[in-house]
Amino acid sequence: MALGFDGHPLLSIGAGHYVQLPDLMDTSSYKLPSWSAVDNPAFWRIAFTLAVVASIETLLCVEATDKMDPRKRITPANRELYAQGAGNVLSGLLGGLPLTQVVVRSSANILSGGQTKLSAILHGGWLMISVLTVASVLRMVPLASLAAVLLMVGYKLTKPALFKSTWKQGLPQFIPFIVTVGFMAVTNDLLRGVILGLVVAFIHILWKNFKVPFHYDRSRYKPGMPIYIELSEDVTFLNKAGIKRTLSEVPDGARVVIDGGRSYDLDLDVLEIIDDFALTAADRGIRLQLLNMPIRPGEKPLAPRSMLADKPKSN
């Protein structure tokens, strides 16, 4: 169609709308790298950005490809990054663009029935042979044709069913997903989109650790019943705010039991909060009992380690 419309005043397309491909049989097409910008900080900033973007895109494509694989095999991510690094070094020395894994080509191999590494090797081999032998034919391909292929493959990868399934997984999964996808769709910036998604997910983790599992519902407390708090296996500084809030909401005169029997790693900041609560418990009429708390460095083991706060002192 592009050839048929050539010369038509309305339907013909310009040279800039075709695939731009140099003649690789001509040695002048290859350019050796210039080292003049090695001492320029902007050069290293751009190089670092490209490396991060390419690595993140490759890891995301690896995960997507593994999910599409009918045999559910797991790609070794380290080996993939090593291969990409070696390929990028060689490509840069020849004056080529940075390399990265692209889910479109991987999905094309899977949809075509490819099941082994040979499919990826042959895919690259056919591209190399085509570029070296029929470059003139490839230059006749309009970019609009390639765009149509990409849109079709992109729709198959991000069809509405994917959004529905992510929505059913709950807001903690859907919000980072839709923020990342929406930002990248608007700005076309993969790195910042992924970083924004990670930030949103991290904020959710902080909020979750603040609320769960140390939230105490004051309205459900009944006088005379002990308040039992069992620490989880791994209590980090992320749980600090939640534990502090929970202990501050304990009613005066209550009995509190804090059990650390399940904890393998209890952050020292959390221990300090519990110690501070123990020091003020007596003044609030709170009877506190600590069970199976981890041994701190320099302490002698006590079995079981427990403490009951003294009764409140009279004024």
Image (cartoon, grey):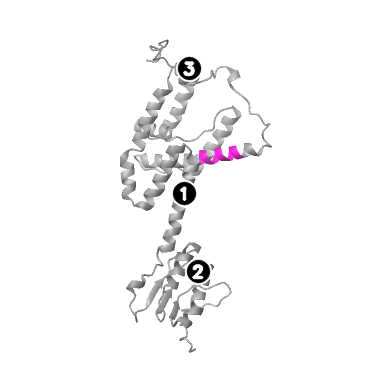
**Relative to 138, does residue 63 appear above or below in the rendering?**
below
The disc labelled 2 sits on which kind of residue? Val
Q: Which residue is mark 1?
A: 198
Q: Earlier in the sequence, mark 2 or mark 3?
A: 3
Comparing 261 with 183, the one in front is 183
Q: Residue at x 52, y 36 (%)?
A: 84
The disc labelled 3 sits on which kind of residue? Ala
Quadrant holding the N terminus:
top left
Q: Disc 2 to disc 1, how far (Cα)?
A: 26 Å
Q: Can residue 103 be seen from the camera position used here?
A: yes
Give the magenta range.
45-55
Query: Mark 2: which secondary structure?
Result: helix
**Relative to 18, does residue 243 appear above or below in the rendering?**
below
Q: Position of residue 106 (x, y in %)?
A: 41, 34
Q: Position of residue 231 (x, y in %)?
A: 43, 69
Query: Mark 3: which secondary structure?
Result: helix
**Relative to 273, does residue 176 appear above or below in the rendering?**
above
Q: Which residue is mark 3?
A: 15
The disc labelled 1 sits on which kind of residue? Leu
